[in-house]
Image: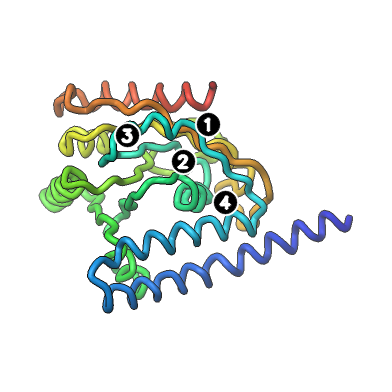
């Protein structure tokens, strides 16, 4: 009974600290953006500590396998399965690579938070259909090709049942246009910590497995579905293995 109460209090603490620390990080990003020449570097360093703080408070013990597969400096597109909102904290804190998030453009309109994301160098993506969406994709590909590694979730949304969903081909177009290696990443355990639709996190173990990079220069735009299937299988193999 005592342990159950302590776990509940810990979950409440995480629920309260997460938005407060996110706001503090956003304000810090704005301050750094106004007084430093390279705010993104500093913001990423703070964001790494933020991710580790949330994991620590939740009692999430995170380990990483496969960093030796990243033999070049980058840039890379890291493509991970999406089990939980907790994936963001685990990857931010423990992936161990300098990367930026890709986020839908609507988030950049959120007061303070949106400006902080711009200061951090995050990449805006238009998810609508049409010329603006294609233009945002081209701009994102240019940023990546110029040296910015990113993390994407090719499933498009979190899984409700811990099962890998089909990978969307739109993310493959980005990888092919950028012409940089795409790295399969498996996140295991976050669904048990914070399932989709739940607010209170539970303690547990998280394993991040980094696979072998896939050379996208061998694919053309017409191969996007083939690349999606290959990447999905690579992530599935990491989860199973």
Query: Gap in Å between the C-alphas at discs 1 and 4?
Result: 15 Å
Question: Mark 1 and 4 residues: CB-CB less than 8 Å, in contact?
Answer: no
Query: Gap in Å between the C-alphas at discs 2 and 4?
Result: 14 Å
In the image, is 48 to the left or to the right of 121?
Answer: right
Closest to the observer, 94 or 81? 94
Question: Which is more N-terminal, label 4 or label 2?
Answer: 2
Residue 174: x and y in percent read 21, 39
Q: Residue at x 33, y 23 (%)?
A: 229
Question: Mark 2 and 3 residues: CB-CB less than 8 Å, in contact?
Answer: no
The residue indicated by pointer 4 is 197
- The label on residue 163 is 1
The residue indicated by pointer 2 is 82
Query: Gap in Å between the C-alphas at discs 3 and 4?
Result: 22 Å
Question: Which is more N-terminal, label 3 or label 1?
Answer: 1
Q: Is residue 37 above or below residue 154?
A: below
Q: Residue at x 46, y 57 (%)?
A: 48
Residue 143 appears in the picture as rendered: yes
Q: Secondary structure at mark 1?
A: loop
Query: Gap in Å between the C-alphas at discs 2 and 3?
Result: 13 Å
The residue indicated by pointer 3 is 168
Query: Gap in Å between the C-alphas at discs 1 and 3?
Result: 15 Å
Question: Which is more N-terminal, label 3 or label 2?
Answer: 2
Looking at the figure, which quarter contains the C terminus? top right
């Amino acid at each position: 009974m005592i342990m159950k109460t302590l776990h509940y209090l810990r979950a409440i603490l995480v629920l309260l600290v997460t938005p407060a620390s996110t706001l503090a990080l956003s304000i810090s990003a704005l301050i750094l953006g106004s007084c430093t020449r390279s705010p993104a570097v500093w913001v990423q360093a703070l964001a790494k500590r933020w991710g580790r703080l949330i994991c620590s408070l939740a009692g999430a013990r995170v380990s990483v396998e496969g960093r030796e597969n990243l033999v070049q400096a980058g840039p890379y597109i890291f493509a991970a399965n999406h089990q939980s909102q907790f994936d963001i904290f685990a990857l931010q804190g423990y992936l161990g690579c300098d990367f930026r998030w890709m986020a839908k453009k609507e988030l950049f309109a959120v007061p303070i938070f949106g400006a902080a994301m711009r200061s951090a160098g995050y990449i805006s993506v238009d998810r609508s259909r049409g010329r603006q969406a294609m233009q945002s994709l081209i701009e994102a590909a240019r940023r990546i090709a110029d040296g910015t590694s990113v993390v994407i979730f090719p499933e498009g949304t979190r899984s409700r049942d811990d099962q890998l969903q089909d990978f969307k081909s739109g993310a493959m177009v980005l990888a092919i246009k950028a012409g940089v290696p795409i790295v399969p990443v498996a996140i295991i355990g976050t669904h048990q910590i914070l399932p989709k639709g739940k607010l209170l996190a539970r303690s547990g173990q998280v394993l991040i497995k980094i696979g072998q990079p896939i050379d996208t220069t061998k694919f053309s735009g017409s191969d996007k579905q083939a690349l999606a299937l290959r990447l999905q299988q690579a992530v599935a193999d990491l989860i199973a293995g």
